[in-house]
Image: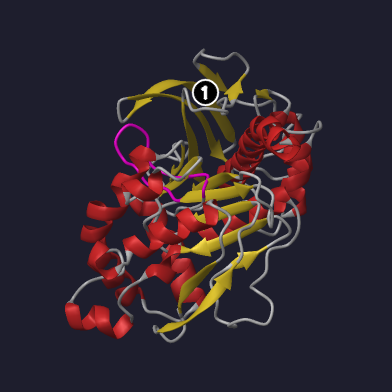
Amino acid sequence: MAAAVKLTSSSVASSPTMQPLYLRTGFHGSSLPSSSFSATPASTDSGCGKSTFMRRLTSVFGGAASPPKGGNPDSNTLISDTTTVICLDDYHSLDRTGRKQKGVTALDPRANNFDLMYEQVKAIKEGKSIEKPIYNHVTGLLDPPETIQPPKIFVIEGLHPMFDARVRELLDFSIYLDISDEVKFAWKIQRDMAERGHSLESIKASISARKPDFDAYIDPQKQHADVVIQVLPTELIPDDNEGKILRVRMIMKDGVPNFNPVYLFDEGSTISWIPCGRKLTCSYPGIKFSYGPDVYYDNEVSVVEMDGQFDRLDELIYVESHLSNISTRFYGEITQQMLKHADFPGSNNGTGFFQTMVGLKIREVYEKLRAKDSPALASAARA
């Protein structure tokens, strides 16, 4: 997933994965100089929670996201009041049949048009409309293009948001969703067996076929992400292999412009915290938080971790009150967002909690960039 702000996910210290967001701000229809906010949320494999993340993100900025009105019913684009999210699958240069004929997967760079991707992301950032292609996930064909107008916030999500250095340079913030193999397998089984009727054998074969390309082209992108959300099996249950209880790590790069990492209790310290059972209801195996400095791909990072899940989201404010630099506008905003989307996958564990937090951080980065641009825009208007 990508956007002018880049978001990516990966595993700490040695496994990078995430997608970028691109957000754009400016005055449309004028000769005033414009500035862009671009972000990439989650450069990761399919079936790993990117769609839910996008819904949480657009909710933070206001309005429900929906496909373009009157357009292709199979469009992958989502538009809300201020945000446009495009899927980088639309830059596939080969349709499903073409990939089979050439023996490549959609993860292979040879199956994607990075030149067009760069040109169109750059155009949006400059305040220009584009004619973006559409990859039809239903038919596997390349459909006629759709017109995309430059929004205030432009998010790009998909497999390769940070693969091309030219596109990376356009991003204001990036996020990578890094899902461990064990959790990814459990999620794909749930989605593809329960929702799509696939057999267990076909799911295993699909994962095995994609893994070499994932390791070669997708996973390395996480080293470029500003934030990585890493999803792992729990450590609270010995030898757990069900994948229902998750340990989630939010890995935040230090020194990123306009971004201050979240911390628990005392910034820069190493903290381990088991919340009071009388203030936070949670069934077996409980909940454990931790925080501290670390090194990830030779970069200094701050890491907040949650292992376990919540029973009552209205009690989440107890945890929220112990975190700092969370970029809320009012007391309890994270809890409010979580309650608002209680039916979203991951709302009872660290995936939804940290995705919501990252959405608020992106909003803050966007507002800081907009504030910096305001004096220049006002000066240009007076001239």
Q: Which residue is mark 1?
A: 291
Which residue is located at x 21 percent, y 72 percent? Answer: 104
Which residue is located at x 31 percent, y 67 percent? Answer: 112
User: In the image shown, does 54 or 240 lie closer to the viewer?
Assistant: 54
Total numbered circles? 1
- Residue bounds of the magenta highlight: 4-19
User: In the image shown, does 160 or 358 lie closer to the viewer?
Assistant: 160
Q: Do we see residue 1 in this rendering?
A: no
Residue 111: image location, x then y, percent: 27, 70
Q: Do we see residue 192 in this rendering?
A: yes
Element carrying mark 1: strand
Q: Residues within 10 Å of mark 1 (few under 14, many from 20)?
A: many
Is residue 17 on the magenta stretch? Answer: yes
Q: Quadrant of the C terminus?
A: top right
User: In the image shown, does 298 or 292 lie closer to the viewer?
Assistant: 298
Residue 336: image location, x then y, percent: 78, 44
